[in-house]
């Protein structure tokens, strides 16, 4: 319990530091990025752009103030969960993101489930049957999965399972069936590295002395594999997942657009194209917080998987 409290305190402190750094970097990048948010506002309002109109908009949105003053004001608003107002839709940024966030989180969870359903069995098979044909199948699947771009894999799945065999819906979100193709696409795209990592770690673990001792005590092969070898070999997978959560949230944008999934992917693409700076800044901030919170959950999972951590070993 004390170890869990220490981990949570450490990660929350890191969250504050990361949010401050991320907020400053995001704000400055938005200010130096090519494009004029004032023009975007005037275009939305559909008025003839004059010098007076530009000055009015700059004063209304605080663009006429020094950058540091703008940043401090924006950061103060963020601390009050006010991410500003979208330039294009005129809706609160937080409201827009919260509308889209559940769909993205749901698809992320579906992709992670597909990832482990694919990677864990293939990694275990490759290790248990090292050097035999099941091992070769496992490795070839990993190579093939790493070689195919996710958007191309998604198109193949759409063609066969939706258009050719009419088994699953093509696009949108409504029923559980709509989750299947985008989740599998996301899972296969991430699986190759996890298969390779788990196989190598499990092969090494199965050759260790404590596994030989378990066999000598008369424990069954299935029990040894499940409760001794596999449990310890999952640590690298959990670590890799924590490190790749940012890539997952970035890569899911392609999947959402391909399958017309109503998540944050299409939203942020439209925001970039329309120079909707408040929405872009809000999106980056929310994703940054999600990444840190996910790493906190990963650290807590260590306590469940590895007994050594529960007995006081620190997580770096």
Image (cartoon, rainbow, N blue to C red):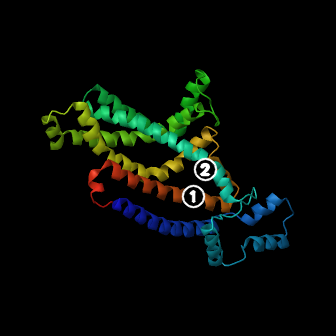
Task: Tell me if residue 316 can be seen.
Answer: no
Label 2 Cα neighbours within 10 Å, binned few <14 / some 14-19 / many ≥20: some
Q: Secondary structure at mark 2?
A: helix
State the residue in front, 220 or 121. 220
Q: Secondary structure at mark 1?
A: helix
Quarter occupied by the N terminus: bottom left
Residue 174 horizontal side relative to residue 14, left or right: right
Q: Cβ–Cβ below 8 Å for labels 2 and 1?
A: yes
Residue 255 horizontal side relative to residue 127, left or right: right
State the residue in front, 94 or 171. 94
- Looking at marks 2 and 1 on the same chain, the residue that comes earlier in the sequence is marked by 2
In this rendering, is residue 46 above or below 203? below
Image position, residue 67 (x, y; %): 64, 76
Q: Which residue is mark 2?
A: 101
Q: Residue at x 38, y 36 (%)?
A: 142
Q: Residue at x 57, y 33 (%)?
A: 155
Residue 198 horizontal side relative to residue 152, left or right: left
In this rendering, is residue 43 above or below 161? below
Q: Residue at x 60, y 50 (%)?
A: 101
In this rendering, is residue 275 above or below 140? below
Task: Tell me if residue 114 can be seen.
Answer: yes
Q: Which mark is residue 286?
A: 1
Image position, residue 206 (x, y; %): 21, 38
Q: Residue at x 57, y 41 (%)?
A: 255
Residue 107 lies in quadrant: top right
Q: Residue furthest left?
A: 216
């Amino acid at each position: 319990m004390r170890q869990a409290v220490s981990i949570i305190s450490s990660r929350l402190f890191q969250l504050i530091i990361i949010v401050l750094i991320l907020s400053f970097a995001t704000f400055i990048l938005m200010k130096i990025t090519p494009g004029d948010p004032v023009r975007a506002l005037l275009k939305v309002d559909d008025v003839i752009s004059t010098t007076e109109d530009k000055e009015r908009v700059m004063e209304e949105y605080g663009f006429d103030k020094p950058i540091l003053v703008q940043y401090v004001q924006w950061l103060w608003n963020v601390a009050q969960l006010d991410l500003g107002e979208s330039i294009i839709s005129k809706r609160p940024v937080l409201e827009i993101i919260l509308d889209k966030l559940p769909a993205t989180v749901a698809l992320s969870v579906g992709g992670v489930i597909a990832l482990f359903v694919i990677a864990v069995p293939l990694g275990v098979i490759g290790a248990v049957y090292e050097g035999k044909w099941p091992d070769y199948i496992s490795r070839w699947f990993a190579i093939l999965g790493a070689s195919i771009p996710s958007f191309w894999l998604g198109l193949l799945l759409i063609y066969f399972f939706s258009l050719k065999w009419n088994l699953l819906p093509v696009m949108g979100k409504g029923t559980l069936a709509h989750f299947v193709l985008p989740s599998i696409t996301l899972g296969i795209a991430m699986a190759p590295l996890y298969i390779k990592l788990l196989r190598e770690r499990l092969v090494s673990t199965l050759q260790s002395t404590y596994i030989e001792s378990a066999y000598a005590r008369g424990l069954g092969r299935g029990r040894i594999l499940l409760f001794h070898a596999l449990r310890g070999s999952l640590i690298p997978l959990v670590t890799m997942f924590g490190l790749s959560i940012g890539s997952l949230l970035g890569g899911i944008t392609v999947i959402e657009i391909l399958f017309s999934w109503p998540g944050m992917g299409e939203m942020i693409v439209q925001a970039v194209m329309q120079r909707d700076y408040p929405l872009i800044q809000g999106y980056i901030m929310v994703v940054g917080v999600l990444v840190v919170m996910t790493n906190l959950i990963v650290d807590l999972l260590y306590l469940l998987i590895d007994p050594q951590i529960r007995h006081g070993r620190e997580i770096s």
